[in-house]
Image (spheres, rainbow, N blue to C red):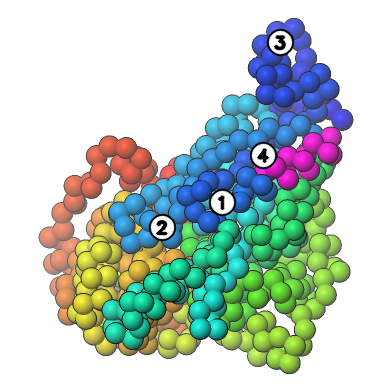
Amino acid sequence: MSCNRNFSSIVVDGDDRAPNRSMLRAVGFDDEDFKKPQVAVCSAWSMVTPCNAHLDELGKMSVLGVDENGGKAVPFGTITVSDGISMGTPGMRYSLVSREVIADSVETVVGAEGMDGVVTIGGCDKNMPACVMALARLNRPGIFVYGGTILPGLHKEKNLDIVSVFEAVGAHASGNISHEELTEIEKKAIPGPGSCGGMYTANTMSSAIEALGMSLPDSSAQLAVSEDKRTDAKAAGAAVVNLIEKNIRPRDIMTREAFENAITVVITLGGSTNAVLHLLAMAHEAEVTLSLDDFTEIGKRVPVLCDLKPSGKYNMSHFVRVGGLRPLLKTLLENGLLHGDCMTVTGKTLAENVADAQPYAPYPSGQDLVRPFEDPIKKDSHLRILYGNLAAEGAVAKITGKEGLTFSGTALVYESEETALRGILDGEVKAGNVVVIRNEGPVGGPGMREMLSPTSAIMGRGLGKDVALITDGRFSGGSHGFVVGHVTPEAAVGGLIGLLINGDPITIDAEKNLLTLDLPEDEIARRQEAWNSPEPKEKRGVLAKYAKLVSSASLGAVTH
């Protein structure tokens, strides 16, 4: 097999390439390896987070898959940060920033070393879209491997995950559970390796990436500690060699239609609001036109079918048990909601990949996780793109209908996540309030932190149906309740959210898709005229660079 002449052939022919070959011999190449396609195997392994603690083993399996199928694997690593550990701290400002750092680092290594193909392996919220963003930029045959979902913890015969701990903090603050029980939940919630167990951001993105065609069938719905996941990683190594042979590249797969498939799947699963941010960014890297309004248009015809956390009752491990994603893809295809002719990393179309998928057991006698089309959880999308004077460029809400579809209340304004959390835990927040958390956007944070601690505290205090929350930050996939994020323009660039004062009347309408400050236009104009641009919070380093380069959240918070 000859290598791709666009890339690693630079080290094959000619005496002037002897230095290149010499360097590679030192890391394990022999004469025959120089005739093979070189495949980068990039893992985001680290002991920073359980999501990524096992990815080194999956990387080794992908290396075997490459080497046993005629390629030469070249493994390397990239960074990751833990949202769950940094959540609620200033360190969380680096979370979304890490998406760009990871994409840049993968591009840098593969571009510098002239590799023919790429396997990327991720297991946490930001390294997953980052890996796919890098594949789209490089446009060399590539594939993504998901690290897999964690097993649930168990307490008093109830399944636990990381969100259980955040909500237990709120329950403890309101006196509903003891300190001892909070500690027990903390100890039992995370039993081992794998990504957060509900349909939070990691599992949402793994499903979206499989629907997009950039991972192998079933990769999205496997346990992190399973033999299926090890097999998936090895098969990915073989698959990328096949992609090189056939010259199938990421932008052949990541088409406009493929992104529509991904959005459709995110909606049926009841997935995270972060999918909006990440799919916009991934499409940007693939040079595919995608906007907030596409989520609205697709959402009009796509129902929510899966009863998964955080708003539902089941974990991803249960979804694995009932059959995973492929039966859902086949059902969506049969109902005319997917583009079946989209190419995938198997070298086959989406329709070909799901042709042999067996249906789920009957609902509700055999399983009650995936509902039929005639009896959905919600007949249209839970992801609502809101506009109005408070969100001239758009905002993103996750509203399943369980919270109601409209909310009117009075603003209670906080300038940061920390002050809002303290206000909620101390009982400042009352029924009828719209909690406003601002200066947490991509520029204002900088970094657009997730508001999981405040939203979980609201739920833990039993205020989920009585209080709304809006922010120019974003939400964890574990957040639920009447919450609206990604409010743009953000406060730091003059958005109206930055001009709110306590007591202002606010309306959130998920039927008309509106987010409005209910004040006369002359009063709003007066406040806007008085606004002055704030000084940047950071003057040096990664956060300062990010704040200077980053676009609006309505465009995916991309940096170029």
Q: Nearer the viewer, residue 170 or 336?
A: 170
The extreme front residue here reads 180
Farthest-out residue, top:
15
Q: Residue 225 placed where, x, y %?
A: 66, 59
Q: Quadrant of residue 321?
A: bottom right
x%, y% of residue 95?
A: 42, 52
Mark carried by residue 18? 3
Give amino acid for label 4.
Val
Residue 22: in magenta span: no
Q: Which residue is mark 1?
A: 53
Would residue 88 appear left or right of 76 to someone viewing this image? left
Q: Is residue 431 visible?
A: yes
| Extent of the magenta region | 59-70
Mark 3–mark 4 contact, CB under 8 Å?
no
State the residue at coordinates (72%, 89%). Answer: 363
Q: Which residue is mark 2?
A: 85
For label 4, count other residues whose C-alpha is less than 10 Å away and answer few (under 14), some (14-19) or many (20+): many
Tell which tag, 1 or 3, sits nearer the viewer. Answer: 1
Q: Which residue is mark 4?
A: 41
Q: Residue at x 23, y 47 (%)?
A: 537
Q: CA distance from mark 1 to mark 3?
A: 38 Å
